[in-house]
C-alpha cells in the first residue's frame, strides 16, 4: 500500500458510539464475552446480553439477501453500534482497532452467510462480488459527500457514517473470502485499495489539518492493514496453504488465535454446538504488537507472495501491503 495518504481523523468520541452505562464493560478487555466462548455460560454481562438479543432481532427482520445487505452499513441502532465498537477493542493495541473482530461479531454478516450458503456456489460468488462493488461505491459516495461538507463547513463535521460504511465494505470482503475463489479476493483487495486511494487524492481534503483540528479518533480510509492480514490468513487457511517466505520460514512472527463465526441467532454463552458454527478455525489477529509500520507492510507483501507461490493468488495485484 502507499504511505498512509488516507488518514482521516473522525471526531467521533467513543461515548457517541457507546452507551455510557456499557462503557466500563466495553473498555475492559475481559468483560465482553465473544459469541464462540461457550465456556463462559452464566458470566455474560446483562447489558451485553440485552444488546445481543436486540441485534438478533434486527437480523431476524431482514429475511432476504438484499434486505440484509441494505442494513449492513446502518448504525442507528445502539445495540449494533455498541456491540461492534466493543468488538474492535477486544485484544487491540492502544493505537489499533480490531475491525476483523467486529465483522465476526456482526449478526447481519452471519445472517448473510447463512442465506448465501443456500445458493448454488456460482451464484453465491457473484452475489458477494456484487455486494462488495455496491458497498465500496457507497463508501466512495459518502467520502465525496463528507469532503464537500468538510471543505465548506464553518465548523468540524463528524464522519461517523464513513466509519460504518467502511464496516460494510469489510463485511463484504469477509463474505467474499468465504464464497469467492481466492483470486477474486486478491482482485478485491487491490480494487479496495486503489479505489479509496484515488478518491482521497482527488478530494482535496487536508487530512492532517482535519486530524489536528478534531483531536478525535483516527479512522483510516485505506484498507486497514490488520484487517487485510486477517483476510490473507483466512485465505491461506481455506486454501490449505502455509504462509512461508522463500526460505520456507513462517512469515508471521506471532501466535494467531482461532475464532468462529456463529449462527446469527445463537445466544451468547450457549453450549458448544458445532451445528451453530458457520465457520470454525478462523484465524484472528487482534493487534500487531511492537512491529513497525514498514515491517507490517513487508509481512503483508510476503503473505501475498506466499499465496501466489502456493497457487491461491495469481500475483497480478500489488505485491506489497502498502
Image (cartoon, rainbow, N blue to C red):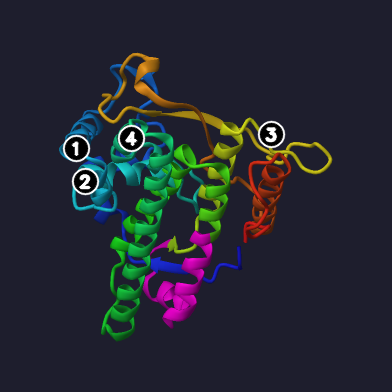
Residue 147, given in percent of the width and then of the height, sits at 35, 77
Numbered badge on residue 67: 2
Please state the horizontal and vertical placement of residue 101, each as a whole percent of the image.
Answer: 43, 40
Q: Alpha carbon of mark 2 to alpha carbon of mark 1: how far? A: 7 Å
Q: What residue do we see at 19% from left, 37% from top?
A: 63
Of the pair 217 and 62, the residue shown nearer to us = 62
- Work out whether mark 4 precedes mark 2 in sequence or the reverse, and give the earlier one: 2
Task: Give the Cα separation between the discs numbered 3 and 1.
Answer: 38 Å
Residue bearing mark 1: 63
Q: Mainly helix, strand or loop, the magenta region?
A: helix
Q: Which mark is residue 287?
A: none
At mark 1, the secondary structure is: loop
Please, is residue 208 above or below residue 299 in the view? below
Q: Is residue 199 magenta?
A: yes
**Residue visible at 34% across and 34% down?**
119
Query: On the image, numbered disc 4 is attached to which residue?
Result: 110
Displayed quadrant of residue 100 = top left
Which label belongs to residue 242? 3
Q: Choose mark 2 or mark 3, whichever is in front.
A: 2
Which residues, given as a range, are shown in magenta?
A: 191-218
The quarter of the displayed image where residue 102 is located: top left
Q: Residues within 10 Å of mark 2 (few under 14, many from 20)?
A: few
Q: Is residue 106 visible?
A: yes
Residue 209 image point, x, y percent: 44, 79
Amino acid at each position: 500500500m502507499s504511505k498512509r495518504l488516507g488518514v482521516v481523523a473522525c471526531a467521533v468520541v467513543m461515548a457517541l458510539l457507546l452507551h455510557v452505562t456499557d462503557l466500563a464493560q466495553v473498555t475492559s478487555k475481559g468483560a465482553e464475552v465473544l459469541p464462540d466462548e461457550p465456556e463462559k455460560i452464566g458470566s455474560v454481562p446483562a447489558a451485553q446480553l440485552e444488546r445481543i438479543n436486540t441485534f438478533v432481532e434486527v437480523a431476524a427482520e431482514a429475511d432476504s439477501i438484499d434486505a440484509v445487505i441494505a442494513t449492513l452499513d446502518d448504525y442507528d441502532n445502539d445495540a449494533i453500534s455498541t456491540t461492534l465498537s466493543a468488538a474492535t477493542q477486544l485484544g487491540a493495541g492502544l493505537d489499533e482497532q480490531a475491525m476483523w473482530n467486529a465483522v465476526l461479531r456482526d449478526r447481519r454478516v452471519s445472517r448473510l452467510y447463512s442465506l448465501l450458503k443456500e445458493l448454488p456456489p456460482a451464484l453465491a460468488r457473484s452475489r458477494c462480488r456484487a455486494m462488495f462493488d455496491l458497498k465500496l461505491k457507497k463508501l466512495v459516495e459518502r467520502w465525496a459527500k463528507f469532503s464537500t461538507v468538510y471543505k465548506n463547513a464553518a465548523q468540524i463535521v463528524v464522519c461517523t457514517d464513513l466509519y460504518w460504511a467502511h464496516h460494510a465494505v469489510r463485511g463484504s470482503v469477509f463474505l467474499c473470502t468465504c464464497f469467492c475463489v481466492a483470486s477474486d479476493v486478491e482482485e478485491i483487495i487491490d480494487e479496495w485499495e486503489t479505489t479509496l486511494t484515488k478518491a482521497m487524492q482527488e478530494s482535496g481534503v487536508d487530512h492532517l489539518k482535519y486530524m489536528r483540528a478534531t483531536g478525535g479518533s483516527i479512522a483510516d480510509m485505506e484498507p486497514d492493514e490488520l484487517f487485510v492480514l486477517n483476510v490473507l490468513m483466512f485465505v491461506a487457511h481455506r486454501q490449505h496453504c502455509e504462509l512461508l517466505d522463500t526460505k520456507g520460514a513462517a512469515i508471521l512472527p506471532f501466535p494467531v488465535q482461532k475464532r468462529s463465526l456463529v449462527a446469527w441467532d445463537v445466544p451468547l454463552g450457549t453450549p458448544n454446538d458445532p451445528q451453530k458454527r458457520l465457520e470454525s478455525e478462523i484465524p484472528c489477529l487482534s493487534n500487531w504488537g511492537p512491529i513497525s509500520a514498514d515491517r507490517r507492510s513487508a509481512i503483508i507483501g510476503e503473505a501475498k507472495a506466499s499465496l501466489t507461490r502456493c497457487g491461491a493468488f495469481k500475483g497480478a495485484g500489488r505485491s506489497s501491503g502498502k
